[in-house]
């Protein structure tokens, strides 16, 4: 039995007390992968951003809001895990300044100064033990395989799961799974629950010892 960390859902980066940057990630793929892992007899810890889905009751669920919180919680949990499946879609940018009060409308354009948030998978990869493994997800809209391979190398992933924007908040998904050499080792389509079962079976076969 392996102990597996799954990051899931979106994160929120507040602009002021009521507004934030985020995306439409639903957490459904993370939910489905967690269920597949539990069904296979593994222990699962989920670090999740704000979602409406319910995760399997057998999982330990740690709820976070921002990308920084997701990273800090994952850094605390990952050292005691065998591997990571990074399904989450963290917000890539945050405002340089979070306003203390609600930003008022002035009739003029609003200029936001944004900076990049930390890369969760890459940060965890930099501190991982040799026996730990990582599976990343890449959602791309152009140069799909090239960008997925680049991300895999940057994040030191053992497998990279490539999908497109049609996967966001959808019940179905279509993915390509690439290994470290850039070879496509699987193409999986269908309901996210079925995709998750096939994908986790591949993870078990290639990475779990």
Image (cartoon, rainbow, N blue to C red):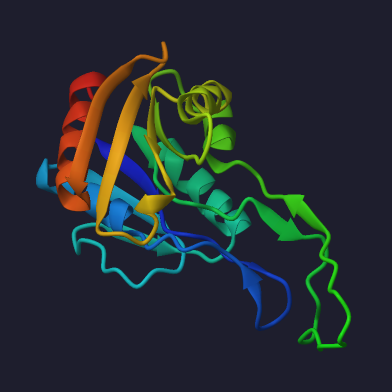
- Residue at 48% across / 60% down in the picture? 10
Query: In the image, residue 106 lies at what x, y percent?
Result: 87, 88
Q: Position of residue 14 (x, y in %)?
A: 67, 71
Picture residue at 71% right of the left edge, 59% below the top: 94
Q: Nearer the viewer, residue 53 or 141?
A: 141
Quarter of the view holding residue 200: top left
Residue 64 image position (x, y, % from top left): 50, 64
Residue occupying the point 81% across, 65% down: 112
Q: Quadrant of the C terminus?
A: top left
- Residue 97 visible here: yes
Q: Where is the N terminus found, in terms of image quarters?
A: top left
Q: Is residue 34 visible?
A: no
- Decide if residue 101 is on the left or right side of residue 68: right
* Residue nearest the viewer, comparing 101 with 104: 104
Compared to residue 26, the image places residue 158 above or below, namely above
Query: Left or right: where does residue 166 sit relative to residue 205?
Result: right
Q: Position of residue 204 (x, y in %)?
A: 20, 28
Number of numbered labels in the structure image: 0
């Amino acid at each position: 039995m392996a102990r597996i960390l799954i990051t899931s859902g979106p994160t929120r980066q507040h602009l002021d007390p009521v507004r934030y940057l985020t995306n439409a990630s639903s957490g459904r793929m993370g939910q489905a992968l967690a269920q597949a892992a539990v069904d296979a007899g593994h222990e699962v810890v989920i670090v999740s951003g704000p979602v409406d889905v319910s995760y399997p009751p057998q999982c330990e669920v740690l709820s976070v809001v921002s990308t920084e919180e997701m990273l800090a919680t994952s850094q605390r949990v990952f050292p005691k895990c065998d591997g990571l499946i990074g399904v989450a879609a963290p917000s890539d940018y945050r405002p340089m300044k979070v306003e203390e009060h609600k930003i008022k409308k002035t009739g003029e354009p609003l200029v936001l100064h944004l900076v990049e948030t930390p890369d969760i998978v890459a940060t965890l990869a930099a501190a991982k033990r040799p026996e730990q493994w990582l599976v990343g997800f890449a959602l791309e809209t152009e140069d799909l395989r090239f960008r997925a391979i680049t991300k895999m190398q940057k994040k030191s992933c053992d497998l990279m799961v490539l999908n497109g924007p049609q996967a966001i908040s959808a019940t179905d998904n279509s993915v390509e799974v690439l290994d470290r050499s850039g070879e496509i080792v699987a193409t999986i389509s269908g309901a996210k629950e079925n995709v998750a079962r096939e994908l986790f079976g591949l993870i078990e076969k290639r990475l779990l010892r």
